[in-house]
Amino acid sequence: MVEELPIAVVGAGPVGLAAAAHLVERGLTPLVLERGPAAGHAVRAWGHVRVFSPWTYNIDAAARRLLGTTDWTAPDDDAIPTGGEIVDRYLEPLAAHPALAPRIRYGAEVTAIARDGLDKLTTAGRDAAPLRVRWRDAEGTEHAARVRAVIDASGTWFAPNPMGADGLPVPGERAAADRIAYGIPDVRGAARNDYAGARVLVVGSGHSAINVVLDLLALQQEAPETRVLWALRRDGVATLAGGGLNDALPARGALGLAARRAIDEGRLDLLTGFAAERVEREGAGLRVHARSRGTPGDVSVDRIVVATGFRPDLGFLRELRIALDPVVEAPPALAPLIDPNLHSCGTVRPHGVVELSHPEPGVYIVGMKSYGRAPTFLMATGYEQVRSIAAELAGDREAARAVHLVLPETGVCSTAALSGTEEAPAAAGCCGGPAPAGVDACCVRDADAKAAGEAGCGCGDPAPAAVPAPAKTATGCCAGAA
């Protein structure tokens, strides 16, 4: 009798639980390993943040069907939730469902995954061998299980990028850890006492940094002594507004517009072309030695928030044959679609099991971690990824390859980071949206150009003069980096 092995799912966040729901729906057995004490542990860490997308994009279809068998009350599809509301109203009820609850292990930190009895170098018998997952529980006890496949949905929240412009911590950064926060601290709530009346340096230019800056400015209204210094690695601010009114997610567009408005009103000190070089203790605060547009200078602050993005923790995958793009650290077939050096929009061509497969059969990296170091991930992307993978594992190859993904577009394709100038406009024209499924192209214009025998549309080539997207029209994706 052939042993029926479970399928390991690493992480009980939105994408991990969606994977479990799809597996159960197809008659497969998941083993969900969550490092935190409850479902949505990482999401709870940014529970005070309101996401860009409404509930309709944040609830997986299989999860919704599963919850529909209970007395669960679905949220209003058009309402925009916070991270905490996603946990309370969706993830916790889903994790408590009788079909999933017995299959979830909490406090289970995955430490290693390998072929059972085979190291990375051994090829003979590899395809026939199951995988072995090891994890450590909250008491420190080691566990192991043989599994048929692994879906890594562990995310990137616990691996934030450091302050250094070179991707490394600057000297003194680790020693000042008690005064440096990463990601999106709750400056108006749980961490209010640390920030009210303080002089705060925020490093970063993405949505996380904008969220922190706007929260600090709101705190400034309550505690006028609060000072905000915003350090951007790029030389200009032209792209901060993103797609603005052109963004198909109004909350995302409004965030960038609010940031530009705060700058225009002089409500913060802006440091552009910023590169930190060293952090030192200075009394109860910190002194940051840095360069701004190449000019050396010092900044004295009470606290620092580093919001420079995240990176995947690949440590427990070291004994597996994983193929990753050397730039983005995403699967090679996915990387060109999301590389911020080529695309800024976040509008991604439909992709699933084919793009997410690795040389190691039965191993998949999904969710935010599948994007490696690239930003602009949306939950809906991860839900479609795991739907496709679950279909493949169930033997339904046709369904696995019939991938359909429609994401709200940002209304901007930026070239400012490529040109390195303040004057570069925030949008670089319209490429018509994502390319059709099954077409080797990054957007509609690219697909049309290749169909006509041309090399392509030139996505990723710096444009000498970018043209803003038309007002109130959601545009497609391509051009330069955000």
Image (cartoon, helix red, strand yellow):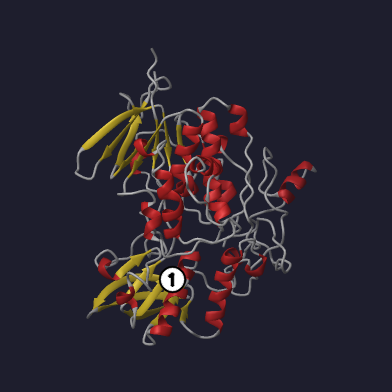
**Most distant residue in the top direction:** 1
Q: From the image, which quarter does the N terminus lie in? A: top left
Residue shown at 70% from the left, 68% from the top: 468
| Image vertical order of residue 116 relative to residue 90, above or below | above
Neighbour class for label 1 at 10 Å: few (<14), some, many (≥20)? many
Relative image position of residue 424 (x, y in whole percent): 64, 71
Q: From the image, which quarter does the C terminus lie in? A: bottom right
Relative image position of residue 250 (x, y in whole percent): 61, 65
| Image vertical order of residue 4 relative to residue 406, above or below | above
Across the whole image, how many numbered discs are drawn on residues?
A: 1
Does residue 329 appear anywhere in the picture?
Answer: no
Relative image position of residue 13 (x, y in whole percent): 42, 48
Say whether residue 31 is left or right of residue 248. left
The residue indicated by pointer 1 is 212
Residue shown at 46% from the left, 55% from the top: 86
Q: Specify the amino acid type for callout 1.
A: Val
Residue shown at 25% from the left, 40% from the top: 136
Does residue 127 appear anywhere in the picture?
Answer: yes
Say whether residue 107 is left or right of residue 314. left
Quarter location, residue 343? bottom right
**Most distant residue in the bottom direction:** 224
**Most distant residue in the right direction:** 452
Say whether residue 349 is left or right of residue 89. right
Residue shown at 47% from the left, 31% from the top: 359
Q: Nearer the viewer, residue 394 or 65?
A: 65
Relative image position of residue 29 (x, y in whole percent): 42, 30
Q: Nearer the viewer, residue 129 or 383?
A: 383
Quarter location, residue 195? bottom left
**Badge 1 element:** helix
| Image vertical order of residue 194 relative to residue 93, above or below | below
